[in-house]
Image (cartoon, rainbow, N blue to C red):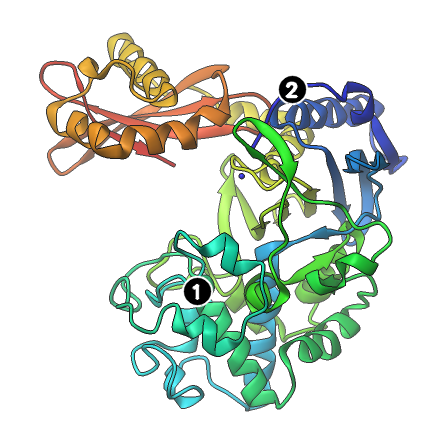
């Protein structure tokens, strides 16, 4: 979620700074410099970044403005919408209810919601892990107009009840907010409590979280950030998703310090049993990098466990690096893509561990200069909207003309000018040979990109991510 320039250069100076005395001053300056670069490139009004070890802050900064119109500085206690980070709360609630015998995550959804769409086909575990194939309720041309108004569970279900599953349950992975809406209702039916009451009583209170609320509370929260987004190149105030729409998939509002209380409590056995946390943090069948409410992947070949969050006006990231024993949290009040929240986490981690970052960026052997030149040219054309289609193979050229060109330009132009193009190797996929690259755009911002060339040297295939 997105970017622009430096009209508020002075405001980007950190408004609040807290750093551990054990942190080297040069390292603190590097983290700060990279963060400011990310925020300037993405035209993000405000942000809060925090690094913790075992719940203790090593470094906490607030940047820019939580409200641009009122010129309110962001602080380390500013509230932000955390979007889909809410999902790990929902997942933990489901596992709590299993621990006390009120449900079984391996049971079919029909056991608890017999009238729900595809209830006899999917299990709770598949809903938790996004391997259910459940169609998305937050899709469609009307989604923004619909999502800012009150709704009911039945109205959410009405948006998907006539749609087929996207794929056979358990066969693959595709992110689905619908699964978490269904899980929210399962929590209510099995606990005999409302979703929000359950979360507060059984999750927030045990974790010691006194500064976590919902989007319904935003108007009364002193220090609540205002959300923004870019439209037609201009920064504008973003709408707020209604609490009844975001619900169990993305309703919470929090501060970095309160979210770290959750991280410590969840990993430390205060919320669910250690074995169940392990279950959350283990990829499920059908997915390479998602467990139950948590992504399990790598950054610079280092294990990473966490989640990102995005809404109309906010992007956030909450990531734990078990090998290094650190948690990095970044909250921003702009809802664009590439997501500044995740970019800040990446930039911060790489500032902390520059040798690890350098090793991950080391080019592979065997690079072909002609192929790399073609890859660079293809990417530039994709960012511009395919002004010159002659370098693409016939099938890809036809797809570009049929609308792919515009979609790619919209997706890729906000990344800006690449700062480096790193060859990462060659791979075979059936009869195709792919050349893989990592494209860098500045601190914390990079993209995996692959190209396949035909016998005439034209780009016949592309891959992103």
Asked whether 167 or 293 is in front, the reply is 167
**Vertical side of 362 occupied by 192: above or below:** below
Q: Nearer the viewer, mark 2 or mark 1?
A: 2
So how many labels did they put on this image?
2
Element carrying mark 1: loop
| Distance (Cα) linking label 2 and label 1 | 38 Å
- Disc 2: which residue: 5
Residue 266 placement (x, y as % from top left)? 67, 66
Q: Residue at x 77, y 34 (%)?
A: 68
Left/right of residue 395 with respect to residue 29 in the rendered view: left
**Mark 2 closeness class: few <14, some 14–19, many ≥20 residues within 10 Å:** few
- Disc 1: which residue: 129
Asked whether 345 or 45 is in front, the reply is 45
Q: Quadrant of the C terminus?
A: top left
Asked whether 112 or 286 is in front, the reply is 112
Q: Quadrant of residue 172?
A: bottom left
Residue 358 placement (x, y as % from top left)? 55, 23
Q: Residue at x 81, y 38 (%)?
A: 59
Residue 428 placement (x, y as % from top left)? 19, 33
Element carrying mark 2: loop
Q: Can residue 441 be seen in this snapshot?
A: yes
Q: Quadrant of residue 399?
A: top left
**Vertical side of 315 occupied by 409: above or below:** above
Left/right of residue 90 with respect to residue 219 in the rendered view: left
Q: Of label 2 and label 1, which has the lower sequence position?
A: 2
Q: Quadrant of residue 127?
A: bottom left
Q: Residue at x 46, y 71 (%)?
A: 156
**Vertical side of 30 occupied by 86: above or below:** below
Asked whether 66 or 32 is in front, the reply is 66
Q: Can residue 107 be seen in this snapshot?
A: no
């Amino acid at each position: 979620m997105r970017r622009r320039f430096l009209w508020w250069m002075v405001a980007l100076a950190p408004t609040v700074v807290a750093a551990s005395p054990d942190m080297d001053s040069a390292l603190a300056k590097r983290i700060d410099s990279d963060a400011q670069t990310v925020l300037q490139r993405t035209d993000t009004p405000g942000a809060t970044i925090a690094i913790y070890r075992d719940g203790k802050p090593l470094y906490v900064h607030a940047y820019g403005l939580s409200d641009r119109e009122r010129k309110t500085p962001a602080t380390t206690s500013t509230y932000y919408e955390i979007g889909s980070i809410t999902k790990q709360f929902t997942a933990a609630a489901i596992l709590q209810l299993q621990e006390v015998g009120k449900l079984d995550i391996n049971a079919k959804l029909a056991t608890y919601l017999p009238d729900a769409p595809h209830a006899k086909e999917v299990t709770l575990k598949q809903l938790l892990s996004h391997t259910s194939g459940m169609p998305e309720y937050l899709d469609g041309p009307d989604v923004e107009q619909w999502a800012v108004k009150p709704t009911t569970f039945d109205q959410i279900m009405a948006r998907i009840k006539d749609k087929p599953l996207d794929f056979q349950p358990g066969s693959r992975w595709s992110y689905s907010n619908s699964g978490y809406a269904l899980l929210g209702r399962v929590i209510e039916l099995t606990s005999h409590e409302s979703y929000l009451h359950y979360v507060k009583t059984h999750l927030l209170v045990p974790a010691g979280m006194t500064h976590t609320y919902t989007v319904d509370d935003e108007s009364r929260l002193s220090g609540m950030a205002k959300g923004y987004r870019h439209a037609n190149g201009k920064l504008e105030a973003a709408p707020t998703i209604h609490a009844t729409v975001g619900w169990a998939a993305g309703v919470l509002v929090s501060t970095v310090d309160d979210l770290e209380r959750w991280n410590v409590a969840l990993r430390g056995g205060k919320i669910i049993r250690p074995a169940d946390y392990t279950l959350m943090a283990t990829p499920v069948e059908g997915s390479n990098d998602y467990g139950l409410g948590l992504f399990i992947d790598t950054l610079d070949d280092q294990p990473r466990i966490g989640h990102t969050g995005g809404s109309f006006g906010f992007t956030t990231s909450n990531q734990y690096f078990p090998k290094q024993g650190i948690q990095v949290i970044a909250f921003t009040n702009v809802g664009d893509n590439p997501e500044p929240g995740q970019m800040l986490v990446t930039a911060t981690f790489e500032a902390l561990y520059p040798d690890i970052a350098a090793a991950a960026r080391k080019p592979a052997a065997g690079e072909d200069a002609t192929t790399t030149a073609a890859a660079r040219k293809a990417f530039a054309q994709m960012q511009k909207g395919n002004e010159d289609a002659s370098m693409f193979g016939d099938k890809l050229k036809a797809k570009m003309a049929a609308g792919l060109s515009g979609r790619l330009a919209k997706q890729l132009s906000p990344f800006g000018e690449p700062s480096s193009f790193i060859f990462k190797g060659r791979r075979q996929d059936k009869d195709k040979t792919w050349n893989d690259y990592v494209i860098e755009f500045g601190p914390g911002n990079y993209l995996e990109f692959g190209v396949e060339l035909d016998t005439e040297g034209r780009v016949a295939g592309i891959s992103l991510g």
